[in-house]
Amino acid sequence: MLALGKLLDLTLADHEPAEKTQVTTGGVRLRWLGAGALEVRPSESCDNGLDLLLSAGIHGNETAPIELLDELLHGVARGDIKPRARVLFLFGNPMAIRKGERYVEQDINRLFNGRHDLSSGAEALRAGELEQFARVFFSVPGRTRLHYDLHTAIRGSKIEQFALYPYKEGRQHSRRELARLRAAGMEAVLLQSKSSITFSAFTYEQLEAEAFTLELGKARPFGQNEQVSLDRLQTRLRQIIEGNEPDTDDSLDGLQLFSVAREIIKHSDNFHLHLPADIENFSELSKGYLLAEDLAEMRWVVEEEGTRIIFPNPRVKNGLRAGILVVPDAGQGLG
């Protein structure tokens, strides 16, 4: 196996390889771009015009997606996977990955779409670097652009594997891409309705990629991910890389769609979330339930039928989202 295929080992060791470019016997070029960043380029005769960005480790303790990308890259470096797409592999937060922590100073996935310019520290700098990697990778005109940002969640979930589909005014969510997610094992998709500050939101809004945040189960340490089944996702990613996806219709049967009803924003240290600490994502909340309180008698009461909560986290910094209320969506606005 080519040494550059061991990108995870290089990242964990904080090691810069002496040889920055290597080529497989099949003519696939591997190029090291920087810490946790490797570009895979097929031979010109095999290139099908797809640029695929695969990122993981934006949160350093979310190891199952990191291990998945490591396996795919090993397959490329051994010649077992024969790419027809250009692929950029990114391990998002090397400092946190080495420590096994979600982040070191601040959450990188709240620092995109201009937010890193308003902050400081190593993780703000890394967010800017990740944006630049993506910007350069997606700069070639006339090519199809696809980004999957792979995560696992802090807590358990009633729906274990789901995706978040970013929003941009004037742009429709794609039924074809949703069908592809269903084939990859996603059980639900949250169709977002406002701009965001996550990595996938940046590539979707600024770089015109089809982009998704994929939540793939609960975060666990390296080597302890037996309960996280990523077989369907791994199969689909390999098919996308090799350009041999089976023909599928645009049926969304079995895929649950949700839209955002409201975001719960923490405004002060007096914020209180009236939920059990171990509540799971997609837990249903009854209409009239007092969900949260903050300063100046600010209250969040559940108003919508069928409301569920995702990403509840009262420990976020003031001004950030402490949870999302979602409701079922019929998908009538899909393109």
Image (cartoon, helix red, strand yellow):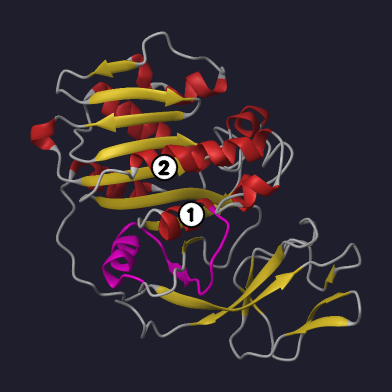
Quadrant position of residue 45:
top left
Q: Mark 2 = which residue?
A: 134
> SS at mark 1?
helix
Q: Residues within 10 Å of mark 2 (few under 14, many from 20)?
A: some
In the rendered structure, which segment of residues is drawn in magenta? 173-198
Identify which residue is drawn at 31% across, 17% down.
Answer: 21
Q: Which disc number belongs to residue 202? A: 1
- Foreground: 236 or 98? 98
- Foreground: 148 or 290? 148
Left or right: 136 in relation to 81: right
| Mark before the other along the chain sequence, 1 or 2 | 2
Amino acid under disc 2:
Ala
Amino acid under disc 1:
Phe
Quadrant position of residue 312:
bottom right
**x, y (%) of residue 126?**
58, 36
Q: Is residue 158 magenta?
A: no
Separation of marks 1 and 2 at Cα, in angstroms:
9 Å
**x, y (%) of residue 191?**
46, 72
